[in-house]
Image (cartoon, rainbow, N blue to C red):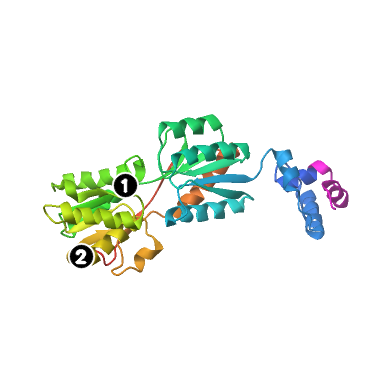
């Protein structure tokens, strides 16, 4: 078995020089670096990860806590995250909470015990218990999807995206616009997207009937149920609907089709998320693209900077774009 000592003897350098080359740390002359790299290549030497972690006090592992594995947004974030982490020799493992806040707290404790170098939390809330736990574990952490003071966070411009989407509907001539949201404990999706909708309607001098605003729970069935409530309880039938996720919008479209309501001639509809399915629906779904993979890449860059005690951005706001399709 080849050891660092063997590499040093073959390259005619010290063991500390080999270590600096392997860990890419400290000064090494170009000639010495080339000799070490050539010997490593010829011998096929692979350093022991365990021994390496003892030297660097790093496990090269990032824990990723996500709310679900059943929707595209977390999977896209993880794709971008993994792509960027692998460039720096990091691995990650996933912890799925199934939207259970207690599991979220348990996983933070577990990841501390597992001695991960950092944690990426794809968050759906910023309640006091969660923020207290983040402070207690004292591990480099990046939150994606929610804004939180004192924590590195990657957010989307939920307020302005939904406001722009609402303005687009109004400019197309729709004035009776319904809204399918989620619980406002999710500040990003539940609160800010709803606020953007309501603020734009108010700015345009348009009333919102109470029955037009309904809530779902991030799945297709709840979107269908929310639209059913809108159709059943509204005094004035809306002519358009904005849903805060594509899955909710897809459920709403299903309900409209069951009632024989034509899309978009009788009811226009849009979602948020730019899911792969959205472009293949009939009619194709107007939506907002948040570029989730780029958010994952950005999350990786910030967590690695924090781990290495390099400058990082505490707040990064991702851009968005409207994708106009046939549902409007």
Q: From mark 2 to mark 1, how far is it between C-alphas?
A: 24 Å
Q: Is residue 117 visible?
A: yes
Residue 137, percent across and down? Answer: 55, 32
What residue span does the magenta drawing correspond to?
1-16
Residue named by callout 2 = 259
Residue 66, percent across and down? Answer: 48, 47
For marks 2 and 1, give the one nearer the viewer. Answer: 2
User: Which residue lies most toward the left here?
Assistant: 235
Q: Residues within 10 Å of mark 1 (few under 14, many from 20)?
A: many
Camera-nearest residue between 310 and 218 = 218
Camera-nearest residue between 256 and 124 = 256
Q: Is residue 312 visible?
A: no
The structure residue drawn at horizontal position 55% and vertical position 49%, both measured from the top left corner, is 94
The answer to whether residue 150 is above or below residue 165 is above
Res 117 → quadrant:
top right
Q: Secondary structure at mark 2?
A: loop
Res 28 → quadrant:
top right
All told, the count of numbered labels is 2
Residue 277, percent across and down? Answer: 38, 65
Residue named by callout 1 = 182
Pointer 2 with pointer 1, Cβ within 8 A? no
Res 322 → quadrant:
bottom left
Sequence-wise, the earlier of marks 2 and 1 is 1
Decide whether residue 312 is among the magenta residues.
no
Decide whether residue 2 is among the magenta residues.
yes
């Amino acid at each position: 078995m080849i050891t660092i000592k063997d590499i040093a003897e073959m390259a005619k350098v010290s063991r500390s020089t080999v270590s600096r080359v392997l860990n890419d740390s400290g000064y090494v002359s170009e000639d010495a670096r080339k000799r070490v790299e050539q010997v490593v290549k010829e011998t096929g030497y692979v350093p022991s990860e365990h021994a390496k972690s003892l030297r660097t006090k790093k496990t090269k592992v990032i824990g990723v806590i996500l709310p679900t594995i059943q929707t595209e947004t977390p999977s896209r974030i993880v794709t971008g995250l993994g792509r960027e982490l692998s460039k720096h020799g990091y691995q990650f493992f996933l912890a799925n909470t199934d939207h259970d806040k207690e599991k979220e707290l348990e996983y933070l404790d577990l990841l501390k015990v597992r001695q991960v170098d950092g944690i990426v939390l794809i968050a759906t809330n910023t309640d006091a218990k969660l923020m207290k736990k983040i402070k207690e574990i004292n591990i480099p952490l990046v939150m994606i999807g929610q804004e939180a003071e004192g924590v590195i966070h990657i957010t989307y411009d939920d307020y302005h995206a939904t406001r722009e989407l609402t303005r687009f509907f109004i400019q197309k001539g729709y004035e009776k616009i319904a809204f399918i949201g989620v619980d406002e404990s999710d500040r990003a999706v539940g609160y800010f997207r709803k606020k953007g909708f309501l603020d734009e309607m108010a700015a345009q001098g348009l009333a919102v009937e109470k029955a037009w605003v309904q809530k779902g729970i991030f799945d297709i069935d709840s979107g269908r149920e929310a639209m059913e409530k809108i159709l059943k309880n509204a005094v004035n039938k809306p002519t358009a609907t904005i849903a805060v996720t594509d899955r909710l919008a897809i459920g709403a479209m299903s309900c409209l089709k069951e009632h024989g309501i034509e899309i978009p001639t009788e009811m226009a509809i849009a979602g948020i998320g730019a899911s792969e399915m959205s472009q293949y629906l009939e009619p194709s779904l107007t939506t907002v693209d948040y570029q989730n993979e780029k958010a994952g890449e950005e999350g990786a860059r910030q967590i690695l900077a924090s781990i290495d005690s390099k400058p990082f951005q505490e707040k990064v706001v991702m851009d968005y774009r409207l994708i106009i399709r046939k549902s409007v």
